[in-house]
Image: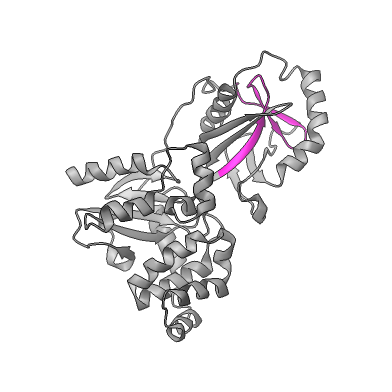
């Protein structure tokens, strides 16, 4: 059997037909491809294999232990992952976790030793010495060649006092579901996050209310691709910012409130710009000129140089504070600490 197999995973955006590939080491790369349909068809074959080879025949462990074993295995392959939830089914645990800003789900046997792969492959997840019964919160230290303080932030879209003691920079993509959650403007994603953690709060809306609007923090938005690219939404946004920063920051929550697939629909994005008072003649002229065609690569290069990993990625001054739609409660502590310095 070729060890280069693919574990099939379910992405929260499956209804939109997106595909994600997540390399995690010598065994697998995760590919979203309607996995539960495939797993349902292959389940009988998998169960037979488990019985034949004795896999999954040991004593059952708790769902939390099974989930933590999978997380530890993924992290042992050099990829960050965070456990979200574990649901017990008739034949296996469904382990949901966040990896590179995307929610994925993988079946794990009740003994917590094996993940079920496509179409009938069983991958051992407890052979690595890092597989344990308690979740480890590993973080990957980004390799940075540039500090946020080295940037001329006037070149990017910002709101708040330029003389504020603290600058928060978000590397984000309008098409990224977890950027939608972090913004606090998308009710569907916010609901999803609070289902997993009732104490969860979005970062951006709270940051605006508590710090930006009170003059304590300057907030800067820089593009970094995290999903389909959101090219139409970003192009309209940059052209709109040319007209007025105020118009852009009214546009920002409207885009994130939309479905992520809509961010590639230029007509819809132009409609949002019109709703915030854009001069549509100037906007169209800007778009037609392809003025910002190179900005995608330019800003992505900045994200890479400062060590931003995935989207959303947040920096408080030069400190890399949050990767993904983390809760505002923890993020606020970093902002307060920076203000106190």
Q: Nearer the viewer, residue 161 or 298?
A: 161
Residue 21 position, x and y percent, is 61, 47
Q: Quadrant of residue 22?
A: top right
Query: Does 47 sit left or right of 306 as displayed?
Result: right
Identify whether 147 is placed above or below 297: above
User: How is the rendered protein coloured?
Assistant: one colour
Name the residue rendered at 22%, 54% in the picture.
216
Location of the N terminus (image quadrant)? top right
Location of the C terminus (image quadrant)? top left
- Is residue 143 part of the magenta span, yes or no? no
Identify whether 40 is placed above or below 53: below
Query: Does 247 sit left or right of 284 as displayed?
Result: left
Confirm whether residue 147 shows in the render.
Answer: no
Q: Nearer the viewer, residue 253 or 225?
A: 253
- Is residue 114 part of the magenta span, yes or no? yes
Query: Does 244 sit left or right of 102 as displayed?
Result: left
Q: Magenta part of the protein: which range?
A: 103-126
Name the residue rendered at 34%, 65% in the picture.
156
Taking the view exactly as shown, the residue that stands out farthest to the top is 59
Q: Quadrant of residue 212?
A: bottom left
Identify whether 74 is placed above or below 328: above
Residue 55 position, x and y percent, is 73, 20
Residue 170 position, x and y percent, is 37, 54
Residue 244 position, x and y percent, is 34, 75
């Amino acid at each position: 059997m070729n060890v280069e197999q693919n574990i099939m995973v379910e992405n929260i955006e499956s209804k939109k037909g997106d595909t994600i590939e997540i390399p995690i080491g010598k065994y697998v790369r995760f590919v979203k491809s309607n996995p539960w349909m495939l797993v349902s068809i292959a389940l009988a074959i998998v169960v037979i294999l488990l019985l034949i080879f004795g896999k999954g025949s040991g004593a059952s462990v708790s769902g939390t232990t099974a989930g933590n074993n999978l997380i530890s295995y993924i992290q042992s392959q050099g990829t960050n992952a965070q456990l979200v939830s574990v649901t017990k089914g008739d034949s296996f645990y469904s382990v949901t976790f966040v990896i590179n800003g995307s929610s994925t789900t993988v079946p794990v046997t009740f003994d917590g030793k094996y993940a079920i792969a496509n179409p009938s492959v069983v991958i051992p997840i407890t052979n690595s010495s890092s597989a344990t019964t308690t979740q480890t919160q590993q973080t990957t230290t980004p390799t940075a060649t540039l500090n946020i303080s080295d940037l001329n932030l006037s070149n990017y879209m910002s709101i708040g006092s330029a003389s504020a003691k603290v600058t928060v920079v978000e590397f984000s993509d309008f098409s990224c579901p977890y950027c939608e959650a972090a913004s606090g403007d998308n009710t569907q994603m916010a609901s999803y996050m609070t289902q997993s953690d009732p104490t969860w709060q979005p970062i951006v809306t709270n940051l605006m209310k508590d710090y930006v609007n009170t003059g304590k923090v300057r907030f800067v938005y820089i593009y970094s691709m995290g999903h389909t690219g959101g090219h139409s939404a970003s192009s309209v946004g940059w052209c709109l910012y040319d007209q007025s920063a105020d118009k852009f920051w009214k546009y920002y929550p409207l885009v994130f409130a939309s479905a992520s697939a809509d961010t590639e629909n230029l007509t819809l994005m132009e409609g949002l710009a019109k709703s915030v008072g854009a001069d549509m003649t100037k906007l169209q002229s800007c778009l037609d000129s392809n003025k910002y065609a190179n900005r995608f690569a330019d800003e992505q290069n900045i994200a890479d140089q400062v060590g931003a990993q995935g989207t959303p990625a947040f920096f408080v001054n030069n400190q890399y504070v949050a990767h993904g739609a983390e809760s505002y409660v923890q993020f606020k502590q970093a902002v307060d600490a920076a203000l106190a310095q």
